[in-house]
Image (tube, rainbow, N blue to C red):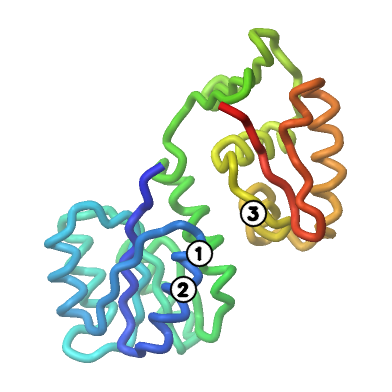
Amino acid sequence: MDRLKILVVDDESRMRKLVRDFLVKSNFEVLEAEDGEQAVDMFCADKDIALIVLDVMMPKMDGWQVCREVRSYSRVPIIMLTARGDERDELQGFQLGVDEYISKPFSPKILVARIEAILRRTNQLNKEEMLSCGGIVVDKAAHQVLIDGTGVELSYKEFELLTYFMENKGIALSREKILNNVWNYDYFGDARTIDTHVKKLRSKLGGKGELIKTIWGMGYKLEVDE
């Protein structure tokens, strides 16, 4: 899957680097702008930007102005960052068409999870509706799984878990990353719930369950010899 481009706009280089490092680890391509004018110029020049992470307080053109400019011709998802927790700011952001609103300081991991959730919601992340590998076929639109042509009944979370493994085949996935992406960022439970679901999923997949490898001390990986 091609890496999606995220435009990170903040006048603090330290903040841009922090966000960029976490996004790159999650396989996103990152563009950076240090002020509002530069952000608008970069967005106009690159039609492939999938989402904007936008600070409010910036020189030359603040985040609100950037948002108005972008919204005049684009519905690209926007996450606003602000050091102020004023409810009026948040309301203004949503009125301007902001998709998410995050107050500083924030967890970069949570920011990445929210970005991924928005991109899934807007059908930019993992657009493929049919996934196939190792004799397993997942039809995301029909919510159906076939093993060598035979249907398999999975629970909702088992289906989501298998889909996530197949979308990331060959990649070692930590339990934390699986929780963030399958159970979403707001899940406050025990990571061992993943082990329970993987065990059930392997059982339902029969012999194909062996394709889900355990990475001891970390998580899991779907490994297929093509």
Question: Which residue position is annotated with label 3?
Answer: 184
- CB atoms at circles 2 and 1 under 8 Å apart? yes
State the CA–CA distance, disc 1 to disc 3: 18 Å
Residue 144 horizontal/vertical position (percent): 63, 19
Residue drawn at 59 percent across, 42 percent down: 170
Residue drawn at 66 percent across, 47 percent down: 182
In this rendering, the answer to whether 217 lies above or below 144 is below
Residue 51 horizontal/vertical position (percent): 34, 59
In this rendering, the answer to whether 40 lies above or below 194 is below
- Mark nearest the camera among 3 and 2 is 2
Q: Residue furthest front?
A: 225
Residue drawn at 52 percent across, 24 percent down: 141
Residue 91 horizontal/vertical position (percent): 42, 72
Question: Which residue position is annotated with label 1?
Answer: 25
Q: Is residue 141 left or right of residue 42?
A: right
The quadrant in which the C terminus is found is top right
State the CA–CA distance, disc 3 to disc 2: 21 Å
Q: Amino acid at mark 1?
A: Lys
Q: Is residue 74 left or right of residue 206?
A: left
Residue toward you, 35 or 90: 35
Q: Amino acid at mark 2?
A: Asp
Q: Amino acid at mark 3?
A: Asn
State the CA–CA distance, disc 2 to disc 1: 6 Å
Q: Is residue 166 left or right of residue 4?
A: right
Residue toward you, 200 or 225: 225
Mark 2: which secondary structure? Answer: helix
- Mark nearest the camera among 1 and 3 is 1
Label 1 environment density (alpha carbons within 10 Å; few <14, some 14–19, many ≥20): few
Mark 3: which secondary structure? Answer: loop
Residue 149 horizontal/vertical position (percent): 64, 8
Question: Which residue position is annotated with label 2?
Answer: 21
* Disc with the residue nearer the chain's start (1 vs 3): 1
